[in-house]
Image (cartoon, helix red, strand yellow):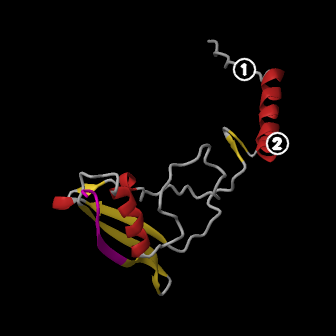
Amino acid sequence: MTTPHPEPPPRVRPAELVAAGLFAVALAAVPALCHELYPFSFAPMFSGSPQVYCTYHVRGPGGKELPPADFKLHRVYNANPPGLGVGRAPEFSFDRFGEAPPPDAVAAHVKGVLAGRPDLPFVDVTQEVVGDTGGGRVGVARTETFRVEGGRP
C-alpha cells in the first residue's frame, strides 16, 4: 500500500517579495510626500474631539419631513481636520460639527435658502443640540423648534 505524497507548498517568487517590499515602502513614503494619493492618506483618523453637534429636522407645510440637505443643514463631518482626508471638497453645509449656532443664525440661513423656494411659504426647523447633559453623560442637551417664513413674496 502506497501513501500519497502531499503537494509541496508553493514557492514565493522573488518578484512577489519585491512587490510586497515596494508596497510597504510606498505605504510610508507617499503620505509623507504627497499628503493625499488614494489609497494613502496623511490625515489622522478621528483627530478632533468635538464637544457638541447639532442634528436638524425640517418640516414643510402639512408636517411633511424634508431632507436637511435641501436646506444645507446636512452633516459633512468625516472626523478629519478640514482639508485633509476628504479627497474632494465636500458640499457646503451650514452645519459645523463641534458648533451649536443659535437658532436665530440657523433661521437666517434657512430664510436665505427659502428665498429660492417659492413653493414653500414656511418651514419648521428643529435643532437638536447633542452634548454634555451633566454627570459625564452625552445626549440631547437642548431642542429648539422654530418657524422660518419665506418662499412666496
Task: Give the prevailing secondary structure in the magenta stretch.
Answer: strand
Residue positioned most to the bottom: 135
How far apart, in angstroms, are the residues tagged by discs 2 and 1?
37 Å
On the rendered structure, is 64 left or right of 51?
Answer: left
User: Residues in magenta?
Assistant: 143-153
* Residue 29 image label: 2
Amino acid type assigned to the residue bearing label 2 in the image: Ala
Q: If you read the primary sequence from the N terminus, does the residue marked by circle 2 or circle 1 appear first?
A: 1
Which residue is label 1 attached to?
8
Inspect the magenta stretch and tell me whether residue 70 lies in it: no
On the rendered structure, is 103 left or right of 88?
Answer: left
Which residue is more in the foreground, 153 or 143? Answer: 153
Q: Residue 78's spot in the image, x, y percent?
A: 55, 55
Which residue is more in the foreground, 74 or 133? Answer: 74
Determine whether the residue tagged by mark 1 lies in a helix, strand or loop. loop
Quarter placement of the N terminus: top right
Count the marks: how many? 2
Amino acid type assigned to the residue bearing label 1 in the image: Pro
Q: Residue 9's spot in the image, x, y percent?
A: 72, 23
Determine whether the residue tagged by mark 2 lies in a helix, strand or loop. helix
